[in-house]
Image (cartoon, rainbow, N blue to C red):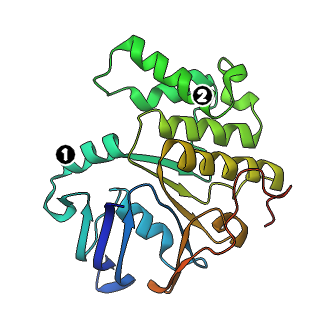
Amino acid sequence: MTDLIEVRDLKKDYVNGEIITSVLHGLSFKIPKGQFVAIMGPSGSGKSTLMHILGFLDTPTGGKYFFGRHDVSTLTEEQLAYMRAEHIGFIFQAFNLLPKTSVFENVMLALLYSDINKQDRKQRALEAIETVGLGHRVHNLSNQLSGGERQRVAIARAIVTRPTVIFADEPTGNLDSKSGKQIMDTLAELNETKGHTIVLVTHETYTAAYAERILRMQDGRLLKDEKVVNRRFPGDGTELLK
């Protein structure tokens, strides 16, 4: 498989006056296109910071980050924004939906600044909503949905731009076990049937078991890079255990 993401000796420091807080300490790894990878670690391990850098929401203070053929350190702010819009889909724990806006409108928002004509934008939005199994909810307001349904709307919004990679930051953190399993099944199906590269940030062993590979972090360092032996697939088991 072709490498989509490569980081070499990646570092991240935050500076507050004379105080320097080092969050990432020289990470190096590659993620091939089409792979499902979980980044695991306790709170404060640096996994969300790493995801923000990989998703062009933040920049490293040392090392190299290559996305495809692009050396990300050479890109301007405008180019980073373009890369983020064209290649990245985000799913967050808090859903980040507009509450008094329909499912359809929430998904359409992701295409607001695209060059796609209006009719094609509508078609893409409807296809994305159908993909996550919410065709019957297309006109419902997001605040009329369950937590699991809202997260599926967030997934539809993430995939409607047809991104190269989907970053999911603790996507089951606000859900009960049944809804959480549905979300993980959906992500696994997107990886298996649509070929989406997925990077999952989680502290939950059960959700990480859906991935092919786990990057284990602690205190800003990569402790292990391991293959998932007993990988879970959609339909496995009845509950997503926390």
Residue under the point 73% across and 43% down: 148
Mark 1 sits on what residue?
78
Which residue is at the front of the view, 18 or 50?
A: 50
For label 2, the crowd category at 10 Å Cα-Cα, with few meaning under 14, some 14 to 19 and many 20 or more, is many
Q: Name above or below for residue 38 compared with residue 57.
A: below
In the figure, is residue 159 to the left or right of 68? right
Locate the C terminus and report the quarter of the image it occupies: bottom right
Report the amino acid beneath label 1.
Glu
Q: Which mark is residue 220?
A: none
Marks 2 & 1, CB-CB < 8 Å contact: no
Q: Find residue 197 and report its horizontal and vertical position in percent.
A: 45, 53
Element class at badge 1: helix
Q: Find residue 31 and report its horizontal and vertical position in percent.
A: 39, 66
Which residue is at the front of the view, 112 or 98?
A: 112
Q: Does residue 92 appear in this view?
A: yes
Q: How many marks?
A: 2
Q: Find residue 45 and report its horizontal and vertical position in percent.
A: 52, 80
Q: Earlier in the sequence, mark 2 or mark 1?
A: 1
Residue under the point 69% across and 49% down: 185
Report the amino acid beneath label 2.
Ile
Disc nearest the viewer among 2 and 1 = 2
Q: Name above or below for residue 122 compared with residue 99.
A: above
In the figure, is residue 77 to the left or right of 101? left
Residue under the point 25% across and 42% down: 82
Q: Find residue 52 and report its horizontal and vertical position in percent.
A: 40, 61
Mark 2 and mark 1: Cα distance apart in space: 30 Å
Locate the N terminus and report the quarter of the image it occupies: bottom left
Q: Which mark is residue 129?
A: 2
